[in-house]
């Protein structure tokens, strides 16, 4: 039996470059793992079985955990069943990568349970078949991601910033946000310059998906304004939303129909998985 934590992520900046012939969008983004984490317990078994503390999460083959198990079997030709219990804490439809993180954690777990037959770089390549954000979670927690998000360049940890996650009850659909994106309206920032600026201590937090998300869900603007007026200098949508991350030492005010979580930026050592440093 193996118990692992599965972290969420935020996008410190997210630049959308263009729409690709395959329907995806070419992006450039600095991803950071945070300690808002699910807990997964894995056991090899006769057949697959997934249970979850949150009844609204599907536990059939549409769940990325079982997709990861299926992919591992397909790639290796090994036959095994996987029994997984998921203690869900990361909200979904939040732009925090919860499902993708669970999938990456599952690939890592199966590899451990089978005696690490597969190199990490191969797990990262396979992970892209599950979803664009899955490879990031196999990095060490800070990475510049390009392509549709799956090309992962691991980077050293930045200076950790005090961070809050604010999640409205209502979620938002990632494809819907991408669909309402107007590429002609985006400022023409050079993401590699933004990346250099982050590492020289002059971060420019921005997200090209924020405007389309605010158009789909106008109540997000009120939430952002409330957080800015409570003193946070940086309040930014994470990924395609609907959650915001706020940077600063302030306490977020209570906001109707929103849940807030305090989060630390985290990294993992090269040879081992993420741990919960508060435990
Ligand atoms: O790769 P994943 O399944 O997580 O993507 C979900 C959806 O988000 C895609 O179907 C697509 O609509 C959108 N997407 C995109 N460009 C990306 C990543 C995701 O258009 N780089």
Image: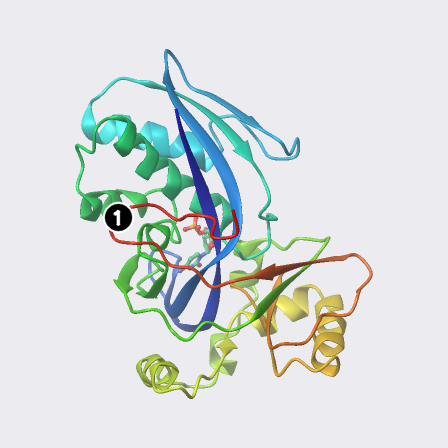
Image x and y of residue 181, in percent: 53, 69
Q: Can residue 242 be seen? A: no
Tell me where residue 164 sits by quadrant: bottom right
Image x and y of residue 223, in percent: 74, 70
Extreme-front residue of the structure: 279
Q: Residue at x 79, y 57 (%)?
A: 257
Q: Residue at x 39, y 69 (%)?
A: 29
Q: Is mark 1 within 8 Å of ligand 1?
A: no
- Quarter containing ligand 1? bottom left
Q: Is residue 167 left or right of residue 108?
A: right
Image x and y of residue 74, in percent: 25, 27
State the residue position of label 1.
Answer: 124
Image x and y of residue 237, in percent: 58, 68
Rendered view: 236 above or below 97: below
Q: Can residue 92 be seen? A: yes
Task: State the SS at label 1.
Answer: helix
Q: Residue at x 73, y 78 (%)?
A: 225
Q: Which sits in the foreground, 11 or 112? A: 112
């Amino acid at each position: 039996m193996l118990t692992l934590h599965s972290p969420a992520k935020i996008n410190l900046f997210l630049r959308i470059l263009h729409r690709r012939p395959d329907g995806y969008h070419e992006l450039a983004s600095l991803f950071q793992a945070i300690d808002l984490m699910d807990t997964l317990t894995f056991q090899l078994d006769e057949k697959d079985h997934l249970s979850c503390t949150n009844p609204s999460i599907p536990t059939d083959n549409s769940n990325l955990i079982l997709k990861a198990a299926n992919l591992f079997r397909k790639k290796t030709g090994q036959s095994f069943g996987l029994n997984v219990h998921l203690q869900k804490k990361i909200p979904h439809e939040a732009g925090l990568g919860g499902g993708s993180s669970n999938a990456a954690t599952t690939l890592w777990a199966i590899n451990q349970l089978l005696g690490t037959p597969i190199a990490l770089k191969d797990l990262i390549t396979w992970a892209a078949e599950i979803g664009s954000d899955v490879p990031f979670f196999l990095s060490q927690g800070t990475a510049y991601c390009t392509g549709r998000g799956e090309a992962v360049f691991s980077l050293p940890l930045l200076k950790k910033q005090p961070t809050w996650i604010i999640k409205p009850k209502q979620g938002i659909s990632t494809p819907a946000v991408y669909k309402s994106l107007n590429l002609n309206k985006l400022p023409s920032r050079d993401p590699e310059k933004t990346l250099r600026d982050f590492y020289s201590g002059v971060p420019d937090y921005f997200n090209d998906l924020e405007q389309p998300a605010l158009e789909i869900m106008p109540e997000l603007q009120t939430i952002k304004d409330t957080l800015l007026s409570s003193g946070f200098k940086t309040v930014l949508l994470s990924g395609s939303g609907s959650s915001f991350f706020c940077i600063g030492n302030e306490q977020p005010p209570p906001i109707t129909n929103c849940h807030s979580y305090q989060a630390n930026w985290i990294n993992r050592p090269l040879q081992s998985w993420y741990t919960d440093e508060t435990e």
